[in-house]
Amino acid sequence: MKRRLLAVILAAVMVMAMVSGCGNKAENAGANSGNKTEDTSKDTDTAKTGDSETGDAQPAKIIKILSIWAEDKDNGKLITDLTKKYIAEVNPNFKYEFELVSSDNLKQKIATLVASDDLPDVFVYESGKPIVDLIENDKLVNISKALEELGVSDMMDEGAVSLLKTLSGTDDLYDLPLGMNVEGFWYNKALFEQAGVEVPTTWEDFEAVCAKLQEAGIQPLTAGGADKWPLTRLVNSYVVRSMGGDAMKKAADGTAKYTDDGYVAAAQKLQDLAAKGYFGEGITTVDQNTAGNMLLSGKAAIFYNGSWFTEALTADTNPAGEDGIGFFNIPVVDESISPITEYSMNCGNILALAQDKYDEGTAGWLKYMVQNLGNEAMTQFGAVKGYKYDVAGDLSSYSKIVADELGKVTKATTWYEAGMNSETSTVAQDYVQTLINGDMTAKEYMQFIQDAYDGSQY
């Protein structure tokens, strides 16, 4: 099963690497929670050496980790658990400080740290355009060279490496993957059965399913409107299906305008779904975690999210059980424009290392992480993160769903903000709540985005 899964993923991502739409852009996805800082360090940064279990002298080091995930959640848990194991198994003189920042504030946080020349040793960030700016300013460790020097290049999944290089437009790797994700709609099977509806394959069917669910007294849709990006993903869904996988790239590089009819129509689709009451009340106050729980607990029928959602699905606390939730790709508008085998995909948020903080101590940690991240992710979450793994055992039913979907991919697209610069991306997300609440028209929303894009060109 593991070899077949790996082959499936490699095949899928190799297809992605050839997709021009991936270009050198990217955007993020992921859960977040409030700001807080956790310092696990008790010592000063005084240089010293000690011995590991093998008796090797180990350098003292305190690294700072900036994350959008808490230490007990998702990739935050993965990073800190492995770091603790590294301390226990390899370097007792290694310590870490952990700082949590909300995903909404991540870009601003990094911009501030760059301006003050104080990037943390290790930090979660976004692939594509955001990381390109740091690469061009020589702020990041060349991961390709570092892993080659450490002798662990072969622990990376070739597909993930290829995708990240494509997204950054570089020959070398400058970031580490934290996921291999497909995105689409998760649905509650019991609610579909209750309403007597089938999984839709066309957008027309999708809207009909929503209507029937509502008629059955079921809230058709939910989304993390408070987090904003889940809403722009829905706009992107219709853009891709109605205009093609390269539509957002065309707008981002100026060969099309966000105010063109197709983009406005996509924004209108989101607003129309909300106006019909399909999202229930107060969607802009619902965060992504709450929305996911609404799906699992049967309070809403359909929820857009990436395959990283399998962590919640495989948890013992999932009230829908091991087979209560299904998945379907974004329904097709026109098969000749965007086929059902075209998926929105990404590597999730990435991990980057500050060039000026990189030294022998960090190198030891990096080597351990790359050697063990694949197995740790598969063991803890049944998830593929972009690293080789060889742990035994079958995938969970939900991980099998993801593997099956990866196996169907013939073409990949990126997400709404993937090609946008920070100014345009900020406006796109800040005003999507106003759009879905009906406080601005779809045309006004797209005009705001176009204005931000135009203003950023000077």
Image (tube, rainbow, N blue to C red):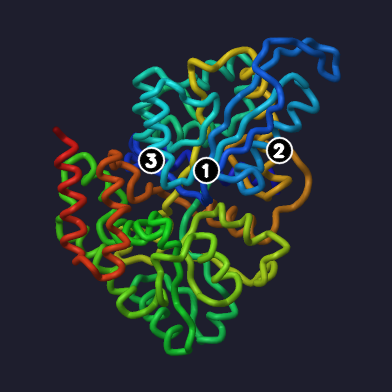
Above or below — where is 167 with respect to 136? below
Above or below — where is 84 with respect to 250? above
**What is the crowding at mark 1: few (fewer than 14 residues within 10 Å), some, or many (at least 20)?**
many
Camera-near label (3 vs 1) is 1
Quadrant in the picture for residue 223: bottom left
Question: Which residue is labeled 3 in the image?
Answer: 26
Above or below — where is 107 with respect to 209? above
In percent of width and height, residue 216 lies at 47, 89
Q: Residue at x 27, y 44 (%)?
A: 249
Question: Which residue is labeled 1 in the image?
Answer: 68
Secondary structure type for disc 3: loop
Label pair 3/2, CB-CB below 8 angstroms? no
**What is the crowding at mark 2: few (fewer than 14 residues within 10 Å), some, or many (at least 20)?**
some
Residue 10 visible? The answer is no
Q: Amino acid at mark 3?
A: Ala
Q: CA distance from mark 3 to mark 1?
A: 17 Å
Label pair 3/1, CB-CB below 8 angstroms? no
In percent of width and height, residue 354 lies at 49, 22
Task: Say which mark, if any, is on residue 81.
Answer: 2
Left or right: where does residue 301 sit relative to residue 428?
right
